[in-house]
Image (tube, rainbow, N blue to C red):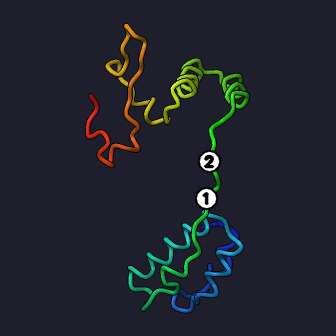
Amino acid sequence: MREKPFDLIRNLPVIETRPEHFIALLECGTVCTNIFSRRLHNFAFDMNWLPAPVLVRKHWPKIHFKEKRGITAEEHGKIIAGERSPEWRAFYRMLWHTGGAQTDIASLRAGDVDWQTKVVSFFPQENWHRGAASHRP
């Protein structure tokens, strides 16, 4: 909310906010501006601070996220080289070698490792709510 684009509506009374104000805000903002302005708008509407939506859902610009990528081996090496804590270095290496998310790897238990075959198994936490894995084995 501290982003510069919000200066366009920051001092406007909520009831005086017009669609063109939000369009101008969104045109000069980022993906985060789009997301937070939607939240602000929907909150004001849900609280009955607005008699009607300023922008109806179909008029909000589509959110376009940048392509995501993993870090490179070189970037990983720089992270490892700059880390003084042996525990954190081990954690970063585990993330790198398993491809697990931070929460997944931090949640590992001894039972998740087959010590004879040297295999680590885990269910990505992001899938738990979708029913992909209702519980850990």
* 77 to the left or right of 12: right
The amino acid type, in three-letter code, at marker 2 is Lys
- Pick the front one: 40 or 20: 20
Please tell me which residue is depicted at 66% across the width and 24% down the height of the picture: 80
Q: Quadrant of the C terminus?
A: top left
Above or below for 106 versus 38: above
- Pick the front one: 8 or 91: 91
- Neighbourhood count class around disc 2 (C-alpha, 10 Å): few under 14, some 14–19, many 20 upward: few
Total of numbered circles in the picture?
A: 2
Measured as percent of width and height from the top left, residue 132 is found at: 32, 42
Please tell me which residue is depicted at 71% across the width and 22% down the height of the picture: 81
- Pick the front one: 124 or 21: 124
Above or below for 17 versus 114: below
Q: Which of the 4 image quarters holds residue 90? A: top right
Measured as percent of width and height from the top left, residue 51 is found at: 42, 91
Please tell me which residue is depicted at 59% across the width and 69% down the height of the picture: 34
Q: CA distance from mark 1 to mark 2?
A: 8 Å
Q: Secondary structure at mark 2?
A: loop
Which residue is under mark 1? 65
Please tell me which residue is depicted at 64% across the width and 66% down the height of the picture: 2
Which residue is under mark 2? 68
- Pick the front one: 125 or 48: 125
Q: Secondary structure at mark 1?
A: loop
Q: Which of the 4 image quarters holds residue 35? A: bottom right
